Amino acid sequence: MKLVVVAGTPGSGKTSVLLHTIKALIRRDNNPAVVKVDCLWTDDDKRFGRLGVPIRVGLAKDMCPDHFTIYNTEPMLKWAEEEGADVLLNETAGLCLRCAPYPDSCLAVCVIDVTTGPNTPLKVGPLLTTADVVVMTKGDIVSQAEREVFRERVLEVNPDSMVIEANGLTGKGSIELAELIENSVETREGMELRYSPPLAICTLCSGEKRVERKYHMGVLRHLDGFMEYKGE
């Protein structure tokens, strides 16, 4: 099973990029499944559902969506395996530029909007700096010079990343992303996060990096919406 975590700022075009990438994966005889994580509401499951792939929605509500994603990584992978998928595409809301939702054995994809300005990559934390792939969207709205400056800013903060210029309307960049997904690593047991999440009220927030549920305490929300408190 391959795990792809797609994160990025709101409105950057994560869903549109994923829709085209799923089409490319299916054409290449892959069996993707999707878990869409959002905060309060989404109807993106209908858009994914029209492609005929297994889709599940998780609403983080009053929990940080990236923390929600990390806590539910194991159940997501188990669900995708039960659905017969060979790759799980996890789109997370990624509202906090400081969060780092990527486990070590996944393909980490950061989607970033070029129109937000040339200095935006310098303002984004581990969401961008620990990504394997940085997908630049909406480049058709700005000039070639602005795209080149933006790309250099991305490589300045993450020189080891693969940069893809994508278009959520035309599907540009989807084949390249699908190829990277096909060649990505398999998930393994005992995954750890690439970077510590920010501090708050659960063990993830206090620096716990192990992904398995048994290591987590505090206020925790499950994929089905059930919330519990674990600990003394």
Image (tube, helix red, strand yellow):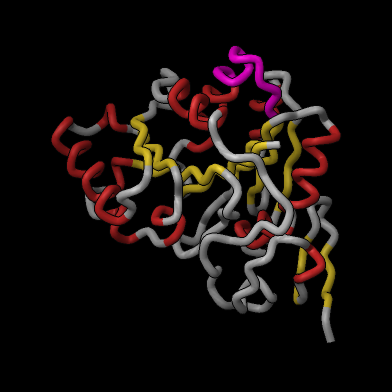
Residue 140: x and y in percent read 28, 27
User: 23 or 182: which is nearer to us?
Assistant: 182
Residue appearing at x 46%, y 36% in the figure: 13
Question: Image quadrant for the N terminus?
Answer: top right
Q: Is residue 61 left or right of residue 151?
A: right
Residue appearing at x 67%, y 32% in the figure: 87
Which image quadrant for residue 231? bottom right
Q: Compared with residue 39, is residue 26 higher up or lower down, i.e. above or below? A: above
Residue appearing at x 53%, y 72% in the figure: 198
> Which portion, as a residue range, is magenta?
23-32
Q: Is residue 56 visible?
A: yes
Residue appearing at x 76%, y 61% in the figure: 212
Q: Is residue 77 left or right of residue 103?
A: right
Residue found farthest to the top: 27
Q: Compared with residue 229, is residue 173 higher up or lower down, i.e. above or below? A: above
Residue 31 in magenta?
yes
User: 214 or 89: which is nearer to us?
Assistant: 214
Q: Is residue 178 left or right of residue 148?
A: right
Residue 131: x and y in percent read 45, 49
Residue found farthest to the left: 145
Residue 133: x and y in percent read 43, 41
Which image quadrant for residue 141? top left
| Numbered disc total | 0
Q: Compared with residue 163, is residue 222 higher up or lower down, i.e. above or below? A: below
Q: Is residue 125 left or right of residue 211?
A: left
Q: Is residue 61 visible?
A: no
Question: Image quadrant for the C terminus?
Answer: bottom right
Residue 35 in magenta?
no
Residue 187: x and y in percent read 67, 45
